[in-house]
Image (cartoon, rainbow, N blue to C red):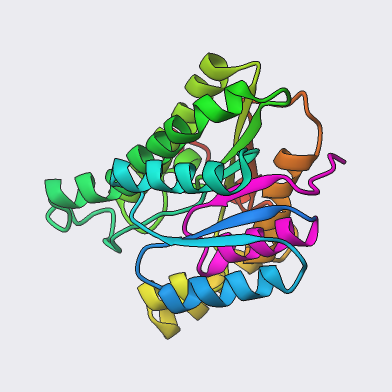
C-alpha cells in the first residue's frame, strides 16, 4: 500500500456522502485534504473538523466545479498551502430525477447543467491540477466517481446516465493522454445508501429500490459511502501500475441485469 502521510488530496463534493467518507479515510492515512462544497457549508465545516481531529491539515473551500475559476482556486489554494497536489477525487455530481420514458421531462438546460458538473467540472479539475502533478516526481492519482448508470443506461435520468457514460469515456482518454505522471481511474457505484438518493426519491421509493437492489444482487447488499470510499482508496494507494480502469461497486447487481440488446 502506498504511504499517504503528508500527501495532499482534493475531494470535490465532500461535505457529505461518498466525498465525506473519502476525505475521512484519506485523513486517517495521514493525508492533508481540501474539502469542497457547493451549498452545504455546515457539512463542509463538520467534515473538516473530523479530518483535523485525525491530525491532518485541511482547507474547506466553497465552489461549483462547473465554474472553471472555482476549480483553479481550489488547486491554487492547495499549492499555496502545501506546495503539492497528489490526489484528486472528482466526486461532485448532480442530477434531475426523471423517468427515462418521459422525453419531455428534460430540457437542454437540464442536460447542460448536469453535464456542466458531472463531466465538464471533472475535466476542469483535472486540468487545474495536471501541471502541478506533472511537475512532481511521483505524479498524481485521479479517481472519477461515475456510476453503474454509465454502463447500464439506468439511473435517475437519461441525462445523468449519459453524463456518467461520458465521464467513463473521459477517464479512458485522459489516462492515455496524461500518463505516465497521472494515473486516472473511475469507480462506478450502484445504489448508494444515504441522504442524496433518499431526498431525490422520497422515503417510500428509496426503501423500495434499496430492497429491490439488495434482493437482486449476488452479495445481497447495496453500496454505502464507506464502501465506495474503500474502492476509491484502492485506486489511490493500491497497485501503482493501474490506469484507465473502471471498477463497478454494486454488490454484483449488474450481473443480474438483462444484457444489452436483449429483453
Image quarter (top left, top right, bottom left or bottom right) of the C terminus? top left
Relative image position of residue 182 (x, y in whole percent): 62, 25
Q: Residue furthest right?
A: 1
Up/down of 7 relative to 15, above or below: above
Question: In terms of depth relative to the viewer, which is nearer, 182 or 249?
Answer: 182
Instruction: Please state if 118 lies on the left or on the right of 180 as rendered.
Output: left
Up/down of 242 relative to 212, above or below: above
Count of labels shown?
Answer: 0
In terms of image quadrants, where is residue 138?
Answer: top right
Relative image position of residue 166 (x, y in whole percent): 39, 34
- The reply to whether residue 136 is in sight is yes
Which residues lie in the magenta part? 1-29
Q: Residue at x 42, y 42 (%)?
A: 164
Instruction: Please state if 158 lies on the left or on the right of 22 as rendered.
Output: left
In terms of image quadrants, where is residue 112?
Answer: top left
- The reply to whether residue 211 is in sight is no
Relative image position of residue 23 (x, y in whole percent): 64, 60
Instruction: Please state if 180 lies on the left or on the right of 192 as rendered.
Output: right
Amino acid at each position: 500500500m502506498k504511504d499517504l502521510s503528508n500527501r495532499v488530496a482534493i475531494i470535490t463534493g465532500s461535505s457529505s456522502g461518498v466525498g465525506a467518507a473519502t476525505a475521512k479515510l484519506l485523513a486517517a492515512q495521514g493525508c492533508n485534504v481540501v474539502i469542497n462544497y457547493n451549498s452545504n457549508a455546515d457539512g463542509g465545516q463538520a467534515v473538516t473538523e473530523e479530518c483535523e481531529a485525525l491530525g491532518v491539515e485541511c482547507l474547506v473551500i466553497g465552489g461549483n466545479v462547473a465554474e472553471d475559476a472555482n476549480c483553479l482556486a481550489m488547486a491554487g489554494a492547495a499549492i499555496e498551502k502545501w506546495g503539492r497536489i497528489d490526489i484528486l477525487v472528482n466526486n461532485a455530481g448532480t442530477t434531475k430525477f426523471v423517468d427515462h420514458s418521459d422525453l419531455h421531462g428534460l430540457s437542454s438546460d437540464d442536460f447542460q447543467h448536469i453535464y456542466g458538473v458531472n463531466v465538464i467540472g471533472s475535466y476542469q479539475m483535472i486540468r487545474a491540477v495536471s501541471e502541478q502533478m506533472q511537475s512532481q516526481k511521483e505524479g498524481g492519482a485521479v479517481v472519477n466517481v461515475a456510476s453503474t448508470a454509465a454502463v447500464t443506461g439506468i439511473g435517475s435520468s437519461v441525462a445523468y446516465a449519459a453524463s456518467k457514460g461520458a465521464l467513463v469515456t473521459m477517464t479512458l482518454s485522459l489516462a492515455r493522454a496524461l500518463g505516465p505522471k497521472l494515473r486516472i481511474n473511475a469507480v462506478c457505484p450502484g445504489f448508494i445508501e444515504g441522504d442524496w438518493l433518499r431526498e431525490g426519491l422520497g422515503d417510500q421509493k428509496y426503501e423500495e429500490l434499496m430492497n429491490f437492489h439488495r434482493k437482486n444482487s449476488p452479495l445481497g447488499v447495496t453500496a454505502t459511502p464507506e464502501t465506495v470510499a474503500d474502492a476509491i482508496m484502492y485506486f489511490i494507494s493500491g497497485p501503482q501500475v493501474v490506469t484507465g480502469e473502471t471498477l463497478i461497486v454494486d454488490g454484483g447487481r449488474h450481473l443480474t441485469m438483462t444484457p444489452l440488446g436483449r429483453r
